[in-house]
Amino acid sequence: MKHIEEAIRKSGDLTSIEVVEGVSGGSINKAYYVRTKDREYFAKSNSSAPEDFFHAEKDGLELLGRHGVSVPEPLLILSQENRESVFLMEWIRSVSSSNKGDRALGSLVASLHQKKENFAGLHQDNFIGELDQLNEPTTDWVIFFRDQRLGRMQNLARKKGKLTKERDKRLSKLRQRLDEIIGHQPDFSLLHGDLWGGNWLMTDEGPYLIDPAVYYGDREIDIAFTYLFGGYSKAFYDRYQADFPLEKEFTDRLPIYQLYYLLVHLILFGESYGSAVDRILQKYTF
């Protein structure tokens, strides 16, 4: 744990470290709860991530924070060649949510999506999971989603041998008719980008968002991801809709936006996600 101790010291906390415990932190990083005499911390470490991996997350948290979203305070990134990188941030003490808390989360996400830009993307690339996520600013959402989301994952999946010939053919065909399938040019909302159910925390002060993959785009893609892997509560969706109603045609686009995240999971975790990818491709191609 010397790398964590070094990060604590470099943050300016010179008090004695009392506890370092491993905690659940996803499948990519090692994660720890750390307590010194003066403060509690959350630390992530990774020995194989790209140099800018934690910096992209830090930038995303800071962008959300500037727009009034409650996020853990990023404190320090310790990155040294051929050694474990550490991302140190404040420890957020979570509690169980309730209908009231889920409604607060719905309002928080609706408020986030009302922060707008005049382009899709971001002024820097970042990551979705451990895969690089392209964000070249584009004023046409369909082109952005076709090339920088579906196209990028199609290329990665090919390289990693995750696309059967039929799957690859259908995905190319789907991308060719994407303008017809999506059917609108949305406003560009600030997105969390990775809004599955494990990327928010409830606290006594309200909901916090964590582990962002931020960019500007169609807010429907954030909401589409919430429906994967069990979905959020009815209270969340009711509050979101009351604050910032979705277009009625949203449900028609939901599978096409979920396809991006399913391709990410196919690449990262394998063929157990292949059948879900295939069902969506078969729905939109003939």
Image (cartoon, rainbow, N blue to C red):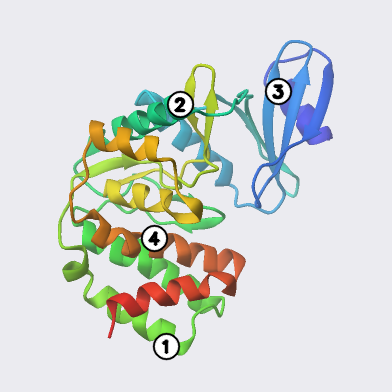
Tell me the tag on residue 166.
1
Q: Earlier in the sequence, mark 1 or mark 3?
A: 3
Name the residue at 83% across, 33% down.
2
> Alpha-carbon distance for marks 3 and 2?
36 Å
Q: Earlier in the sequence, mark 2 or mark 1?
A: 2
The residue carrying pointer 1 sits among few (fewer than 14), some (14 to 19) or many (20 or more) residues within 10 Å by Cα, namely few
Looking at the rendered image, the quarter that the N terminus falls into is: top right
> Alpha-carbon distance for marks 4 and 1?
20 Å
Quadrant in the picture for residue 106: top left
Secondary element at image label 4: helix
Query: Callout 2, which amino acid?
Result: Gly
Name the residue at 45% across, 55% down.
228
Q: Which residue is mark 3?
A: 10
Looking at the rendered image, the quarter that the C terminus falls into is: bottom left
Q: Earlier in the sequence, mark 3 or mark 4?
A: 3
Query: Callout 3, which amino acid?
Result: Lys
Foreground label between 3 and 2: 2
Q: Where is residue 269 shown, x and y percent of the image?
A: 61, 65
Whether label 4 touches label 1, CB < 8 Å: no
Q: Earlier in the sequence, mark 4 or mark 1?
A: 1
Tell me the tag on residue 101.
2
Report whether residue 20 is seen.
Answer: yes
